Image (spheres, helix red, strand yellow):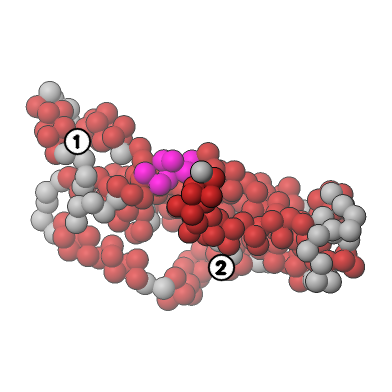
Amino acid sequence: MRLAWIARHSIAIALTIMFLAPVVYLVLLSLMTSNQALTSDYWPNTWHPENYLRVFQVTELPRYLLNTVIYAVAATVFMLISSVPAAYALAKLKFRGRNALFLTIICVMMLPPQVVTVPLYLMWARYGLTGSIWPLIVPMLFGDAFSIFLLRQFLLTIPVEYLDAARVDGCGEWRVLLRVVLPMARPGIAAAGLFQFFFAWNDYYGPLLYTSENENAWTLSLGLASFHSVHHVDWNLVTAATVLTMAPIIIVFFFAQRAFVQGVTLTGVKG
């Protein structure tokens, strides 16, 4: 019976091993001595969990973590506040130029961020916000093209009859959005929020561009890169810092994976 179960799930088991093997090796490497980490050993001769404490002693990891949490949470909240109404308008409201506006959003998705780097940096420098994470957070108040696209595709799956019934009962468009659409769109909103949260947590280009001159505003990705360049021979400490950086995002995904998978699965059922 057990062999039959393994045979039926062999592909899934193989993919799981392929995914977990590098993570497990990363954890084992973080528990080795500095000398053993430079060898080809796969198992620690002696266990050194104090490597994780040394990371906090030789780097400003708590401050990087706080900056990253502020960036990821604020950017996600601002994105949802701005993108959900925009997606609702594109999905459920009929107005002239709706298709042209949606096409413009798709074109913005295809635009490389490097194209607008110089004018945006000059604008934020004029306002005196360079050297902080605010140039990465404030733009989310004006929506995110990918999030609007994702949410619109999900909102198209909500039957319009529910919205018409609410309008007949006297609800305006804002009440329809808040009372009817939002409760039904929780999986799609969760998926869009998690995409934005993961992007902000792992973002390196943005913090490098705007906060590189101010170490107090560094995020985990930028701090980890700097830590790697300084301690490139201490692979046990580098991998320990990497594990600490990865752990929060893995925990978040573990608890939110059902809503995330459901939102991604249902998105795009209608074109």
Residue 134 visible: no
Image position of 110 (left or right of 156): right
Name the disc covering residue 205, or none: 2
In the image, what residue type sits under mark 2? Tyr
Please give the name of the residue rendered at 49% of the width and 54% of the height, measured from the top-left corner. 7
Q: Position of residue 246 (x, y in %)?
A: 64, 53
Residue found at x 30% / y 56%: 149
Residue type at mark 1? Answer: Glu
Which mark sits nearer the N-terminus, 1 or 2? 1
Residue 162 lies, with reference to residue 222, above or below; the image says: above
Q: Nearer the viewer, residue 253 or 170?
A: 253
What secondary structure is found at the residue carrying circle 1? helix
- Distance Cα–Cα, label 1 vs label 2: 38 Å
* In the image, residue 54 above or below residue 183: below
Q: Quadrant of residue 107?
A: bottom left
Residue 33: tell me if it is visible: yes
- Position of 31 compared to 226: left or right? right
Residue 38: horizontal and vertical position, in percent?
84, 71
Q: Quadrant of the C terminus?
A: bottom left
Q: Position of residue 137 (x, y in %)?
A: 50, 53
Q: Residue at x 12, y 34 (%)?
A: 161
Residue at left offset 45%, top offset 52%: 8
Specify start and end residues of the magenta stretch as a single range.
256-262
Residue highlighted by disc 1: 173
Q: Is residue 40 above or below residue 21?
A: below
Q: Based on the picture, tell me whether residue 74 belongs to the magenta stretch.
A: no
Locate residue 212: give its quadrant.
Answer: bottom right
Indicate the secondary structure of the residue bearing disc 2. helix
| x then y, percent, for residue 20 | 61, 56
Label the magenta part by its dominant secondary structure. helix
